[in-house]
Amino acid sequence: MIIGVLGPEGSYSEKAAQTWILKHRLDSVGIQYFSDIEDAFLAVVQGKSDISIVPIENSIEGSVGVTLDLLLENGVEIVGEIVVKIEHCLLSKGGPEKIKVILSHPQGLAQCRHFLKKYFPEAELRSTGSTSHAARLAGEFEEMAAIASPEAAECYRLKVLLPNIQDRKENYTRFIALRAAGKSPAEQVLCVPDGETGKPENSSHSAFKTSIIVYLEKDRPGALYEILGAFAKNKINLTRIESRPSKKELGDYYFYIDFEGHTGDVLIEETLKDIKSKTDTLKIVGSYPAFKA
Ligand SMILES: O=C(O)C(=O)C[C@]1(C(=O)O)C=C[C@@H](O)C=C1
């Protein structure tokens, strides 16, 4: 089995993949690294990976827009989620006095904005494809430092000048595991929640999440309220709601909604039917076990 992630080695995406491998006790797995999130995502559509694991949201910086857009545009299914604690470090080959440029993935730079402004106001900030890409570059140039993980420091033989530099102590990124839509049920083993061997119907609602994308027919008063009302009526707990520009015109949005429960459950099916009758587009992106640490 091949798992596609954002590389190079030492990225947080790789950490998410390692967590996935451990949780599912998978063996004979190879990790394939891609240079950006889009390529890692599309690998599963193009048959270059069996599963792709990509970031979707961070507790400080919010959504990863490219992942949301690709979910809408491609035939994929979310089969799981992984939450990784993010502890950014300032890494470099030399001492702090040499630092002129600080590199990281845009998410890494954004999650450390206050730190950078306070301690390195003169440094040039440069975006890289990933935090581990930043670390690899910092290993080549003394005047460059990287914002990346302790694992990346080890990987590229860098010094940890400062640990835990993100603006909030608690910093988490949620990743999703994807496969190409319509894969065989033989692979359903990837969808069984931790510690459970039964079918989804036997599990409690909160053990599973379902992700959908909706597009409202037209902008009218109460349209979103009606969708949310369908969940409220059936006492279904929403875990996330996010809007994303439709890119058709300003002020026009897709809504990304995650809620507790699994498709196939009578109440969930009823709710989805109700929502379908009220929307122009309803895309079910997956029902999968909620992450448990
Ligand atoms: O750059 C990495 O190491 C990644 O895996 C990407 C990514 C992201 O895009 O959110 C993952 C976790 C951190 O939030 C920072 C960057």
Image (spheres, rainbow, N blue to C red):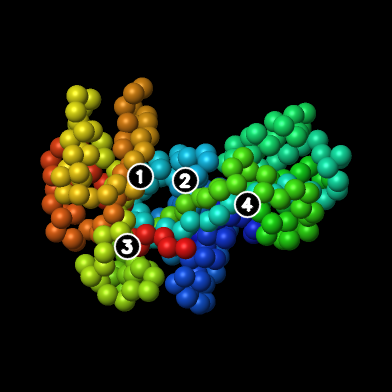
Q: Closer to the camera: disc 3 or disc 2?
A: 3
Q: Mark 4 and mark 2 in contact? Answer it, CB < 8 Å.
A: no
Q: Mark 1 and mark 2 in contact? Answer it, CB < 8 Å.
A: yes
Task: Residue 69: give x, y in percent of width and height.
Answer: 40, 41
Q: Residue beneath label 4, please?
A: 87
Q: Residue at x 16, y 49 (%)?
A: 234
Q: Residue beneath label 3, please?
A: 207
Q: Residue beneath label 1, please?
A: 240
> Where is 27 relative to 269, above or below?
below
The answer to whether residue 176 is left or right of residue 122 is: left
Q: Mark 3 and mark 4 in contact? Answer it, CB < 8 Å.
A: no
Pick whichever of labels 3 and 2 is earlier in the sequence. 2
Q: Secondary structure at mark 2?
A: strand
The answer to whether residue 261 is left or right of residue 149 is: left
Camera-side residue of 239 and 188:
239
Q: Quadrant of residue 195?
A: bottom left
